[in-house]
Image (cartoon, rainbow, N blue to C red):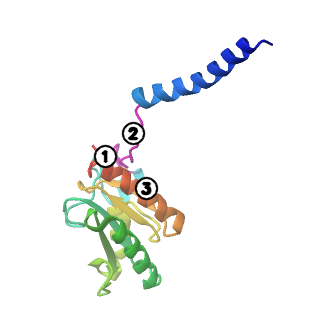
Amino acid sequence: MSKFIKAVFLIVTLLVPAGIFTFLKYFGNNKFDVEVMYEAGVPDKYKTECNINSVPYSISEFVLDKKAGLKLAAFDNGSDELEFKNISIRLSELFKDDLNIRLLAKDDKQSPYFKTLIVTAENYEKYIGCNFILEDLNQLVLLDEKNRIRGYYGRDLDEIDRLIVEVKILLENGVDGE
């Protein structure tokens, strides 16, 4: 093989990936989004049990205030207070005023780490289930400023990391995600 053919082959081999990269960089659109849940309505189970008919679904203002910004709802499931503290500290350090964290707790339980909304013990699970479309109280629920549900997250490290990424995406796109 002659040196000329080798040189042409080398140049083509280098230019093709560079050309693809340049094309995608200037003409591609890399925008991520976090979907709004229940835009077509809630599952049938909640329509009958909780009498929910609103489409798209958003949480009522009396449950959580319609304060500007993203909201994260945590639920008192009898777990260790230290877990709430660790989650709150990590999220507060990252997002300061961009994320309002609320703990929904039974009766008179207060938390120094979260703003707490008190719910009576006998109605607690139904109240949480019907308002947040939630069966597992060991989850966190992310809401946008229109009180629409944007995601459910566990309390382990991987899920908190996913929550952080999705909050950053929503903040980058605008708090209401539109």
Mark pair 1, 2: CA separation: 9 Å
Q: Which residue is mark 3?
A: 165
Which SS does the magenta portion mostly show? loop
- Is disc 1 surrounded by few (<14), some (14 to 19) or many (20+) residues within 10 Å? some
Residue 17's place in the image compared with 108, above or below, is above
Residue 111's place in the image compared with 135, above or below, is below
- Picture coordinates of residue 55 (x, y %)? 28, 46
- Picture coordinates of residue 26 (x, y %)? 40, 28
- Picture coordinates of residue 100 (x, y %)? 28, 67
Is 150 within the magenta? no
Identify the image quadrant of residue 17: top right
| Residue sitting nearer the eye, 159 or 75 | 159
* Quadrant of the frame with the C terminus: top left
Q: Which residues are magenta?
A: 29-42
Q: Are marks 1 and 3 in contact (CB under 8 Å)?
A: no
Q: Are marks 1 and 2 in contact (CB under 8 Å)?
A: yes
Query: The disc labelled 2 sits on which kind of residue?
Result: Lys
